[in-house]
């Protein structure tokens, strides 16, 4: 029993001896900002409680003048999140579709052939982008080979493009151009038919298909292809003259 009394006395003495240090820490501005208080009041409503240290089992102990018990800061309340502005499409496909739609609308409303040609170049650049680094690399190498006159090498590269991405219309259009250079007009016409089924707004593929069909003697098929191309890009003055000539051959003059 004496040992228990002695232990309790030593505990209280140690706590009281530490109070000046606790007070100096509490009054230090740096401590107020950086340290996390180990003790807190049970009730925030009574300001006098800030000068009283409550210890479970030992009761309340008055603090020296100027010392205060550090209180934990209340957790911030959840603030309602502001509505975020609409974001552009994350994936490239919707962005590309939006760009194509805009360019095609401008193409149809072009005031002259020069303006239409500038928009057509932008469209062809957009169509040439596959979204695949591998396909874009093969397309680029095929273009270099074609420009250098290595037509067979270009054909092999474009065969790989069509094999890897059969739904990529640009690969078919470019292979058709190489096939025409190699004299394979029927193969070119077949590739162009596939291309316009995949992308029915390819006015350039329709005009090339018309030329291939006319070369094969299929005048009605050629006339239809020319008309489809002109419906998308009406400022093709040279193609319009071709369509008028072929129309007279196929349909005759109006009575």
Image (spheres, grey):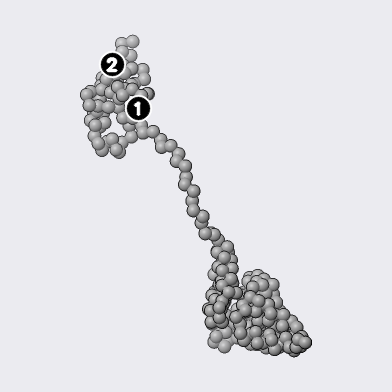
User: Residue 68 appears in which quarter of the rendering?
Assistant: top left
Task: Estimate the x, y position of residue 96 in percent, counting from the top left.
Answer: 56, 66
User: Residue 175 appears in which quarter of the rendering?
Assistant: bottom right
Any part of residue 1 in sight: yes
The residue singled out by tag 2 in the image is 9
Examine the rendered structure and indicate whether residue 35 appears above or below residue 57: below
Task: Estimate the x, y position of residue 211 in percent, counting from the top left.
Answer: 68, 85
View extreme (top): residue: 1
In this view, the mark in front (2 or 1)? 1
**Foreground of the two, 85 or 61:** 85
- Residue at left 31%, top 18%? 60
- Residue at left 65%, top 81%? 207
Counting residues from the start of the chain, the first of labels 2 and 1 encountered is 2
The residue singled out by tag 1 in the image is 40
- Residue at left 52%, top 59%? 88
**Foreground of the two, 18 or 79:** 79
Q: Point out the image quarter for the C terminus.
A: bottom right
Task: Estimate the x, y position of residue 243 in percent, counting from the top left.
Answer: 68, 85
Going by the image, does 136 lie left or right of 194?
Answer: left
Q: How crowded is mark 1: few (under 14 residues within 10 Å), some or many (20 or more)?
A: some
**Foreground of the two, 156 or 77:** 77
Q: How crowded is mark 2: few (under 14 residues within 10 Å), some or many (20 or more)?
A: few
């Amino acid at each position: 029993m004496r040992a228990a009394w002695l232990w309790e006395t030593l505990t209280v003495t140690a706590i009281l001896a530490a109070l000046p240090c606790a007070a100096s820490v509490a009054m230090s501005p740096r401590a107020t900002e950086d340290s996390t208080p180990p003790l807190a009041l049970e009730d925030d409503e009574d300001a006098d409680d800030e000068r009283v240290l409550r210890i479970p089992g030992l009761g309340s102990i008055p603090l020296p003048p100027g010392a205060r018990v550090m209180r934990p800061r209340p957790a911030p309340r959840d603030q309602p999140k502001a509505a975020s502005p609409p974001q552009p499409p994350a994936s490239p496909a919707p962005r590309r579709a939006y760009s194509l739609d805009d360019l095609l609308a401008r193409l149809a409303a072009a005031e002259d052939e020069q303006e239409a040609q500038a928009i057509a170049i932008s469209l062809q650049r957009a169509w040439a982008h596959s979204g695949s680094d591998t396909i874009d690399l093969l397309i680029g190498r095929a273009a270099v080979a074609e420009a250098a006159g290595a037509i067979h090498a270009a054909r092999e590269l474009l065969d790989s493009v069509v094999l890897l991405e059969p739904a990529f219309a640009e690969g078919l259009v470019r292979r058709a151009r190489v096939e025409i250079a190699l004299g394979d007009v029927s193969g070119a016409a077949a590739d162009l038919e596939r291309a316009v089924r995949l992308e029915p707004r390819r006015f350039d593929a329709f005009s090339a298909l018309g030329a291939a069909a006319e070369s094969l003697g299929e005048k009605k098929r050629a006339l239809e292809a020319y008309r489809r191309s002109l419906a998308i890009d009406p400022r093709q003055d040279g193609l319009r003259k071709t369509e008028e000539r072929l129309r007279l051959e196929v349909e005759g003059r109006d009575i």
